[in-house]
Amino acid sequence: MPAFAVIGAQWGDEGKGKVIDFLAGKASVVARYSGGNNAGHTVINDSGSFGFHLVPSGICWPHTRNIIGNGVVVDPDVLLKEIADLKRAGLNVDGLAISERAHIVMPYHVLLDKLEENRKGAGALGTTGRGIGPAYIDKVARTGIRMGELLNPEELAMRLPDIVNHKNEVLTRIYGASPVSIDTILSKIQAWAPKLAPFIKQVEYIVEDSLTRGENVILEGAQGALLDIDHGTYPYVTSSSPTVGGALTGLGIPPRAFGGVIGVFKAYCTRVGGGPYPTELNNEIGEHIRNKGKEFGVTTGRPRRTGWFDAVAGRYSARVNGFDSIVLTRLDILDGLNPIKICVGYELDGHRIDRFPLEGGALERCVAIYEELEGWPGTTFGITRDRDLPKKAMAYVKRIEALVGAPVEIISTGPKRHETIVVNDIFQK
Ligand code: IMO
Ligand code: MG
């Protein structure tokens, strides 16, 4: 029963969309397991250029079933727009299926996200402002609304006043904001229900049946391990579990179903939003990487904070997730830089540490210790065979492999599907 989890190994934006679109050619199902439309996954192939927030990145393959799992929080307006955009691009989205149990991001969640960020002022987390945290809060508080409830709008209409009245108390009394209108929300629900009903299914059984038939299933991660609510750089994290555990609970599959865990790393680091970041480059090299790599958020357009590859964080991420394989993306962005640095340890309070610190506030005090590697001549852009890579580029890849402790099996050398080097077939392991 080969399920392959594709997991962001850093702070998100590692190129998961491109990698999943590439791998989905050999998969029957692509199932997203966590997060919401805080994600932004860029996919460029023969069908066009897409920026997905909720629809899984396997949607461009006609033979691949795309699923949104119970662990995801869904903003119906965003999803409907994505479905409409895909149809306009001539793609068939009939096979898309959304778990009955996925929670809905409601308009008041989006308001609360922004109000809470404003309230925090200088201590704001830098969320995407998409209502993701508040939607997960309601899920855990057991006051959320699930996709399956759209199949029974009358019953939901009866439940809604109590929920909305409580939100209005919070909006008006805590934040001094205007209340939301129950009627406006009801009419939204009435508009969503018939459009989304055909997609709402018991997706757990679709995934299970595919696994039982021995087909490849890709478990699509969003965000990254270092943004994980438990294992990330709390409180500067997202409100879900992007790490491997989230793939199990976010789709309801057993560990035995796994064929492999794939970590997607960018050849350098980026982070968007607040939080500690030892390898951050606040200089012209960081600026160069940002401009060359077009490191601006797909979701919010914010400039991403750029930095050198952090192998301490990478090794930690590999440990938390148990990576069997690494996919290394955006190698071409480092073309022409010399030297290239890799963070191999931290100095914390005058001592060298080699392991990612777990205690709160420690990462803020860590100073990166670097190893320097020589840059390579020419360009790696668009290369499709590993033997065509400059020797020094391969040396950089091999150094990352050794430091992180998992083999690099795919190297991405450009944003398009075919701009990819397959070192080893991940599905054949
Ligand atoms: P993909 O799937 C990068 C970050 C936000 C913020 C923190 C919390 O494209 O890799 P949230 O809105 O989730 O409450 O914000 O998490 N963040 C991401 N950063 N890529 C993402 O997704 C992200 N999703 C959330 O910037 O720092
Ligand atoms: Mg992204």
Image (spheres, rainbow, N blue to C red):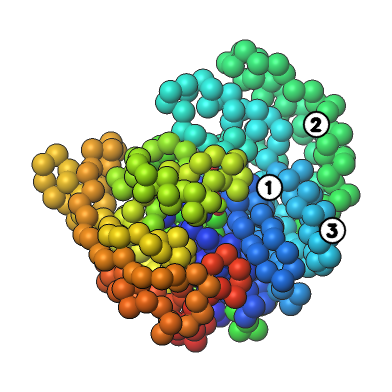
- Near mark 1 (Cα within 10 A), the count class, few <14, some 14-19 or many ≥20, is many
Is tag 2's residue or tag 3's residue first in the polypeptide sequence?
3
Is 110 on the left-hand or right-hand side of 147? left
Q: For the residue with label 1, is its CB less than 8 Å from the closest atom of ligand 1?
A: no
Numbered label tally: 3
Residue 219, x across and y down, in percent = 57, 66
Residue 389 at least partly seen: yes
Mark 3 — residue? 88
* Residue where numbered disc 1 is placed: 74
Name the secondary structure under disc 1.
strand
Quarter of the image where one finds residue 171: top right
Specify the amino acid type for callout 2.
Ile
In which quadrant of the rendered image does the N terminus lie?
A: bottom right
Mark 3 and mark 1: Cα distance apart in space: 21 Å
Residue at screen point 83% across, 44% down: 192
> Element at badge 2?
helix
Q: Distance between the residues labelled 2 and 1?
A: 15 Å
- Residue wearing tag 2: 185
Q: How crowded is mark 3: few (under 14 residues within 10 Å), some or many (20 or more)?
A: few
